[in-house]
Amino acid sequence: MKIIYEEEIRNETVMNAAKEIMTAARTAPKGRGFDNLVIALIGKEEIKEISDKIKQMSKEKNIPAFFLRDAENILKAEAMILIGTKIKPLYLNPCGMCGFITCEEKDKNPDIPCVFNTGDLGIAIGSAVSKAMDLRIDNRIMYTVGQAVLEMKLLGEEVKIAYGIPLSVSSKNPFFDRK
């Protein structure tokens, strides 16, 4: 009789779930149907590289101690979703929610986000972690990971805002109740 233990298929299970989670993020509603999101999946090796980058950043910059905590914490993940947005206005005039009168005026300030870009990113992240919850995959949204991802340019030059969502299957979510 062949028995398959959960531990033997854990990584495969998390990777398959991650693909569904990415799909949930992609299919989340977007302003005017414009999709400026970049979504990627990484495994343990790449997670270690991001962890190392966060540690390097903490030595070189004056950043809070929780960056180091998160750098260690993500090493407990089997996989991680990286999700970010490009900064491109949707040309909904009149709008002005970014602080500029028109999108054409905002275009003169390319590093200032369009509120719809950040809103769409938030909705997509919410859809992603909701799907993770449905699949009983432990997760947490981490901006610290996003900061390293941006410095490493892992999602490309155009992505200006990013987050990481580490994924884990264990008896206790390693991303909460941390020291």
Image (cartoon, rainbow, N blue to C red):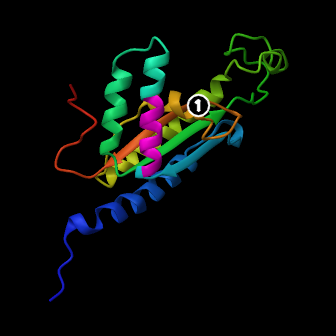
Query: Where is residue 20 drawn, in percent x and y?
Result: 46, 57
135 or 57, nearer to the observer: 57
Q: Position of residue 19 (x, y in %)?
A: 47, 58
- Residue 151, above or below 22: above
Residue at (24, 39) in percent of width and height: 174
Q: Amino acid at mark 1?
A: Leu
Please name the residue shown 57% across and 46% down the image: 39
| Residue depicted at 46% across the width and 26% down the height | 56
Q: Does the stretch in magenta take in 47?
A: yes
Check disc 1 and report the residue beneath it: 150
Magenta-highlighted residues = 45-54
Res 79 visible:
yes
Q: Is residue 122 visible?
A: no
Q: Is residue 80 left or right of residue 150?
A: left
Badge 1: how crowded within 10 Å, few (<14), some, or many (20+)? some
Task: Using the rendered view, name the quadrant where residue 141 is placed.
Answer: top left
Quadrant the C terminus occupies? top left
> Is 115 contained in the magenta span?
no
Residue 21 pos. (x, y %):
45, 52
The residue positioned 51% from the left and 30% from the top of the image is 148
Q: Main secondary structure of the magenta part?
A: helix
Q: Quadrant of residue 30?
A: top right
